[in-house]
């Protein structure tokens, strides 16, 4: 039996999206319109967790931090794809197992490439 969906089936999703966007825009407008507007020199200075600001924030530093962060996000997101596979493991059968081995081999190849390029070395 084939189930066909119509445009009316998406109405709750559209309403939820409109409510979410309306809430975000309404909250931003309300805080801007109702909030205090006193600007002093102390309020306009940068606040860095209670530490006095020293020097320029635009000083260059090593890109290794960003590289490690991006690699972490990349591999973390890839691991998220394993959860649906684990939940539906029995329905996928042997074909799903082979596909996961291919997926894992691709991840392993990427990880080996990162190690060969010494992207995780901090020296």
Image (tube, rainbow, N blue to C red):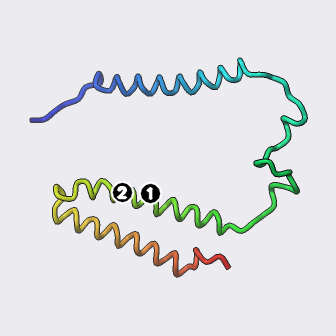
Tell me the SS state at disc 2: loop
Which mark is on residue 77? 1
Is residue 46 placed above or below 13 in the rendered structure? Answer: below
- Label 1, residues with CA under 10 Å away: few <14, some 14-19, many ≥20: few
The quadrant of the rendering that contains the C terminus is bottom right
Residue 104: image location, x then y, percent? 34, 69
Is residue 49 placed above or below 76 in the rendered structure? Answer: above
Residue drawn 82% across and 44% down?
Answer: 46
Reading the image, the residue beneath label 2 is: 81
Is residue 92 placed above or below 16 in the rendered structure? Answer: below
Residue 11: image location, x then y, percent? 34, 22
**Is there CB contact under 8 Å for labels 2 and 1?**
yes
Residue drawn 82% across and 51% down?
Answer: 51
Is residue 11 placed above or below 69 in the rendered structure? Answer: above
Residue 85: image location, x then y, percent? 28, 57
The quadrant of the rendering that contains the N terminus is top left
Say which quarter of the image contains residue 8. Answer: top left
């Amino acid at each position: 039996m084939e189930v066909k969906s119509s445009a009316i089936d998406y109405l709750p999703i559209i309403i939820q999206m409109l409510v979410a966007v309306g809430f975000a825009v309404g909250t931003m407008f309300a805080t801007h319109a109702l909030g205090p507007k006193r600007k002093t020199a102390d309020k306009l200075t940068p606040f860095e967790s209670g530490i006095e600001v020293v020097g320029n924030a635009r000083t260059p530093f090593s890109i290794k931090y960003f590289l490690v962060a991006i690699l972490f996000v990349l591999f973390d997101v890839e691991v998220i794809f394993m959860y649906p596979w684990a939940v539906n493991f029995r329905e996928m059968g042997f074909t799903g197992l082979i596909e996961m081995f291919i997926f894992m081999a691709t991840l392993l190849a990427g990880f080996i490439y990162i190690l060969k390029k010494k992207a995780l070395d901090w020296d």
